[in-house]
Amino acid sequence: MTTTMANSTIEDRDFQELADPYRRELLAHCYRMLGSIHDAEDLVQETYLRAWRSYGDFEGRSSLRTWLYRIATNACLTAIDQRGRRPMPSGLGAPSDEPERPVVASPEVPWLEPVPDAVLGADAADPATIVAARESTRLALIAALQHLPARQRVVLILRDVLKWRAAEVAELLDTSTAAVNSALQRARAQLEEHAPERDALAEPTDPAQRELLERYAKAFEEADITGLIELLKKDVVWEMPPFPEWFVGADTVVRLILAQCGPAPGDIRMVPTAANGQPAFGLYMRGGDGAHHPYQLHVLDVTAEGVAHVSAFFDTTLYPLFGLPERL
């Protein structure tokens, strides 16, 4: 009995030491599959629990990493079958041209969620890894992936994002290399239909971008509508889950802010953060108690011409994940 318990303890310790280094990349994989950081965290926990229970039967016919990816991918496929895809408002219909009309939330829709950069954090010592991680988690890409059938989504992520060989993907999915290549071709074609045209996104380290972001925050905090218009591209897109309405055009967006929010100077405070490899802000609104409380999480697409896209998430349960305070 004592020997059995000792062997079990050694086996548990071995599993933890060998498997823990893959936790963060598995979280990124599950997030790309599911479009939800909350669901991704749950699925990674489930993956490690399943793997720990089965570790004694792991025969090493594939690498531990591949084995963990197999478990995580199958868990994600089951979750997608049960929960469906997670859209953004711009993926559900045409933009609204009535910004003064009251918007109505649709909480029954499982909306796409942003992910904190700090949660997925690429290896800071490898700039190439950082760039790849940033490109493969941008909100526009995650939203476009949601349009793909689940198995095509797996194939595209493993082949084009993680750079697995077709034979490795075929082994993971228990299918043929020809089937993988066919699924990849269909996935790429469908992704091309749903992915927006890419602007030349500014790099986070670009001084001009940092200045623009400072001006963006200041415009909101000072209720400077003229200053805000100067920062938005003429064809800027503004969407705000859980509201299905979305808007296009700087003038329309400003009308929306004035009609639906109407802030006075000092009503808003902006706290910088980062999401999906993009600049972001926690927007706090002043309440009746005089304190500023979580209101929206802005994730921005910034180009040399200005802010091209604002995704304003009203889900304030995201704030703790971003390390943002409960109140200011």
Image (cartoon, rainbow, N blue to C red):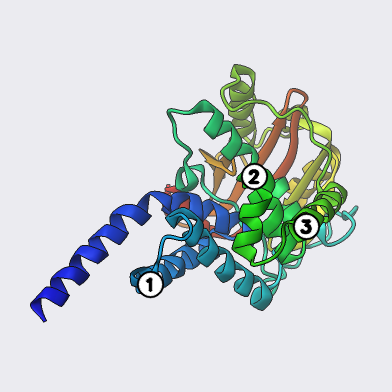
Q: Is residue 70 above or below residue 296?
A: below
Tell me residue 253's x, y (percent): 79, 44
Q: Which residue is at a point 30% across and 58% down the rendered structure image?
A: 16
Gap in Å between the C-alphas at discs 3 and 1?
Answer: 30 Å
Residue hosting label 1 = 57
Judging from the image, what secondary structure is the residue with disc 1 in? helix
Which of the two discs, 1 and 2, labels the residue nearer the N terminus?
Answer: 1
Residue hosting label 3 = 178
Residue hosting label 2 = 161
Tell me residue 184's x, y (percent): 77, 53
Q: Is residue 315 left or right of residue 18?
A: right
Q: Is residue 274 above or below residue 156?
A: above
Most foreground residue, 253 or 146: 146
Which of the two discs, 3 and 1, labels the residue nearer the N terminus?
Answer: 1
Q: Is residue 114 above or below residue 306?
A: below
The picture quadrant where one finds residue 87 is bottom right
Q: Which residue is at a point 61% across and 74% down the rendered structure image?
A: 78
